[in-house]
Image (spheres, rainbow, N blue to C red):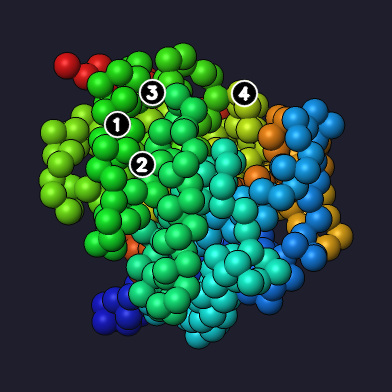
Amino acid sequence: MSTQQSLAVTIACCFFSLALVAQKTNIDREFWLQQMDKMARPVMSNLAAGTLKTNMPVELTKTVDNAANRTTVSYLEALGRTFSGIAPWLDLEGGTTSEIKLRNEYRAWSLKAIANAVNPASKDYLQWTGGQPLVDASFLALGLTRCPWVWKNLDTVVKQQLITAFQHTRSTVPVYSNWVLFTGMIEAFFCKYDLPYDPVRIEYAVREFANHWYVGDGMFSDGMEFHVDYYNSIVIHPYLAEIVSIMNKKNKGFAWFVPKLTSINKRYAEIQERNINSDGSYPIVGRSIVYRGGVFHHLADISLRKQLPATLQPAQVRGALTAVIKKTVGAGGAYNHQGWLTIGLVGSQPALADFYITTGSLYIAATIFLPLGLPEADPFWSDAAVPWTSVKVWSGQDLPADHAMELH
């Protein structure tokens, strides 16, 4: 074989290898899209059709504190939590023909779903006053800050009804915990879209965490006490990151906090990635464990923001989160025969749930899909698969030791 022929063969092999890599990463994205669609479709399609309250079964725990109230609020939980997870993908443009078609379907559903949710004349008008509605109105607000497309394309009347619905939450005094971020997020939504907002609620939320509740090594206490659970990921880190980003773009009001928060977010991302075992399982600690992939809200969010620490390659995070998806909602029993999520972590395990958990609560699991808001060409999707930390260590690889982060 001539030198020229050898070179041609080598080039062909390289192209073949690249094609295999592309095919593998495309498979990952296709799997994520399938799983996102499976989770979100019942919620978004039914609310768009005005049949959410008719068709969504509300599973409650045996320890529920107020069955009637929890049932009423469960529908807003389903909307806010689902939408907050799919919002970045809804805001994205481009992709394969099938992905574009799917996105257009969900965009249409989102506009109709929100319209029904905030229209007092709709049979699917949702509950906007009280404690739990504050929580889930904030998740909807978070989703809308992540997806300007939906806000821009809402009808003028619907926008005003949505504003009114969010304003209803101002009568609720938040619990002195991560709940202060819920009020802060709704006001940050108003700020982002140049609507009248209360800066005190935002300032209070951020300063409590920045000045009083950071306990070290990338983690905050949840109010006055530190809890060993996943609320740093479920709420605290993603909410702080979004609120601070919105306000700094508006008036640089929290520029003083950015260097510290960036370091904190990166360190907690390292901890989250190390918590994912080689089979996609993770420590079962703390409350709300039935949120499934929602306990990795922060790792998904910081990947979407392209702010992962240098110690984590995007492809290894993709692999770790894919394993989590397969372990939780990929397992049998994660959905009932109608396609709605069941209470549990791997299948149906209702005893794992806290008193406030309902069917709607479970849809915070959709936040694991945030990286779908990155285009297919982004390294998160296009880079070749890389094993995550647990896979490396438990297969015998020698890695540098992990160390706590100290801020001075």
Spatial CA distance of label 2 from label 4 is 27 Å
Upstream in sequence: badge 4 or badge 3:
3
SS at mark 1 in the image: helix
Q: Residue beneath label 1, please?
A: 204
Q: Is residue 337 left or right of residue 395?
A: right
Upstream in sequence: badge 2 or badge 1:
2
Amino acid marked by disc 2:
Gly
Q: Nearer the viewer, mark 2 or mark 4?
A: 2
SS at mark 2 in the image: helix
Q: Nearer the viewer, mark 3 or mark 2?
A: 2
| Location of residue 371 by image quarter | bottom left
| Location of residue 32 by image quarter | bottom right
Q: Residue beneath label 3, please?
A: 220
Q: Which mark is residue 184?
A: 2
Residue toward you, 376 or 278 = 376
Q: Quadrant of the N terminus?
A: bottom left
- Residue located 42% across and 70% down the image: 159
Q: Which mark is residue 130?
A: none
SS at mark 3 in the image: strand
Amino acid marked by disc 1:
Tyr
